[in-house]
Amino acid sequence: MGVIHKLKPEVLSFIIENKQNNPALSCRYLTSLVLEQLHIKVSKSSINAIFKENNLSMPIGRRRKLKKKKFNMPVLPVIEDINKKGDGSIFQALGSGKIEPSPFLQDQEKEKIAEEKTAQEAAENKRKQEEARKLEEEKAVQEAELKAEKEKWARLAEEEQKSKQPTNREEVILPKVELVAPEILPEDRVCSGAIILKALDYLIGGSKEINAAISRAIGGRPEDSLNLTEALIFKSLFGKDKFSTLGDLIGVQYSQEKLSSYYAQIKQITDIGLDTAKIISNVFTEAKGVKVHFIDGSIIHLDGQLHSSWPATRFPYDFSNTAVDLKNNLNKYFLQGQPLVLFSPSGYDILPKDFFNLLLNIGSKDNYPDSLTLFGNQLEELDNIPLKHEHRYTLVFGLWPWQFTSSRKVKKIGDFYLKYIKEIDRDLYLGEIEIDLFRASSNQSLSLKGCAVKTDLKEKIRLVILNSDQQAMGLDALAGIYLSRWPNFEEAFQDFSRKIELFTYAGTEQKFFSKDSFGMDTAGLTMELTEIFANYIKMLDAYLRWHFLPAEYAAKDFSSTSDCFYKIPVKLTASQSRVRARTLVSQDYQFLKDLEYLNCRMNERQISSTKGKIFWFESAFK
């Protein structure tokens, strides 16, 4: 024991490099990783001996940090503002001591603060005027939409009166529903907390796909029946005495008779139960991640929620996503020309090789991505997407001040100015920054520009947002691109780190979300359509508890989340691009901490309604 027998240099190098990149990696994890990547079986004792020989062993005993229940975000004096010397050269701000400013610089700083305050007040007045103008415009748009919706139902009712002649098609003629215009509710209204499940339904597309199948069968337009289909699906959440609450959730108030008539119509569609069950099973298919194939044959692995790149397929199942949502995101980034937005590279000391290679090649003219392969939680291939290289791919990501201090050098930090980030409705101080990233082992480096972020002018830098694209971009525009995807960046870092740490110790024992326990494969044969719809709601709840709530909720049931979240009132307020969902709870609400965690996870997904507006969840007192 403790003796390393005949390990090839590349095996030793692989073990040492992975341990240096992530000191928390255990012998057990590296044993599996070596077997998976290099197809060589190495014992844990041999790997432990390599750790000792290279001074990579972790301290003996229980780690003190594991006893902490809270993960406080460190704000370290790692990145300081860079001043210029008299000769014009820029000296490094990382790892240096504090520099005392001269009296002249102090006067300049006071003048700058005064100017900043004046500019802030002017910007605030301008913003208030702009908000008032937008409110008027949005009110006019909402009134026009309501008018158009009522005209649509009147048109459908008129068409219904004319469509009395039998068709020549040799199929069952379905009875038509009497189209009486329902009550269209305004976008600004109060509904139940079940809007959380409705937003999740928007994310995975269940109701949309079910309604599309119904529309094809009855020969109608999907937009004409979508609200009716949604009402039938979510009906199981509400009793007969709370039927109006269903309308508040859907946005359209239907009568019992209307829904009963529509349900009777769609029940006559051949195999509607089987088709619906199949659709539900498909939308809950999870993708653990995606392999990005480059033309030189290299592969970069990204997790399903696009937090980061990884050296292989071994990363937390917590970062899995539905294949539907992952495809939608990949479509934006690789087919529509939008920047690929990743949360952050994993690790602390050395910039990971896979992330560095992604940066080198993502915008390359010579070695660009040529295909994407989605894979499931059991590493099975789900889909392959060829890329035509019609767009120039770019990458935007976050970097923390304490990360990779031995793999980066700050070249420049500009002045900070208060900017309003409309994507998150928040004021932040932004400053231009330029950083060199390098890997000494490969003697490669690259220079990236971006913006440094502060929440207060006098504090240290909280976050650096970098862009692989060298073309000029406004700091507020760059910050908006990143923060619209990761709006609660400091809380998100805590959650990201916690899940990686849990996976490091749990390893292969960690479980993933499974749709099999709901029996959707046979539901079309054994369940009524109403039961299938009710089962879909329970699957939405289970998926919410698994991916959007703290880990302990995975073992709870529907009644628990219903009491905690679905029954509380929510105020919906719509703007031109956003639907703000404010949960009407007080600061002493029993489950407030879990609700705030849920809001953060929901906001990271950029969930869009049928009208294209992004949901934003928050508590009323914020």
Image: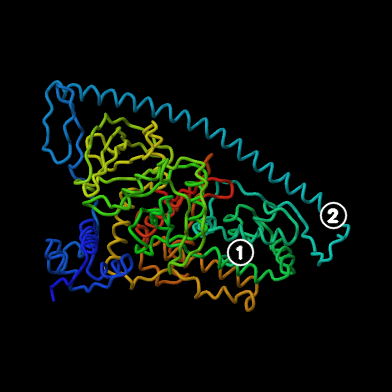
User: Which disc is residue 589 wearing?
Assistant: none
Helix, strand or loop under label 1: helix
Q: Quadrant of residue 519?
A: bottom right
Q: Which residue is mark 2?
A: 163
Evaluate whether residue 424 shows in this view: no
Binning the other alpha carbons within 10 Å of mark 1 as few (below 14), some (14 to 19) or many (20 upward) gives many
- Please say if 294 is above or below 127: below
Asked whether, in this view, residue 477 is left or right of residue 20, the answer is: right
Q: Which residue sits at x=60%, y=46%?
A: 186
Q: Nearer the viewer, residue 128 or 241?
A: 128
User: Which disc is residue 233 wearing?
Assistant: 1
Amino acid marked by disc 2 = Ser
Asked whether, in this view, residue 293 is left or right of residue 206, the answer is: left
Evaluate whether residue 535 shows in this view: yes
Binning the other alpha carbons within 10 Å of mark 2 as few (below 14), some (14 to 19) or many (20 upward) gives few
**Residue 159 picture location, percent across and down:** 81, 50
Q: Which residue sits at x=43%, y=64%?
A: 564
Q: Which residue sits at x=81%, y=53%?
A: 160
Distance between the alpha carbons at the discs numbered 2 and 1: 28 Å
**Residue 53 picture location, percent across and down:** 11, 64
Q: Nearer the viewer, residue 94 or 314?
A: 314
**Of label 2 and label 1, which has the lower sequence position?**
2
Amino acid marked by disc 1 = Ile
- Please say if 166 is above or below 153: below
Comparing labels 2 and 1, the label whose residue is closer to the camera:
2
Q: How many marks?
A: 2
- Please say if 519 is above or below 293: below
Helix, strand or loop under label 2: loop
- Please say if 448 is above or below 5: above
Quadrant (top left, top right, bottom left, bottom right) of the N terminus: bottom left
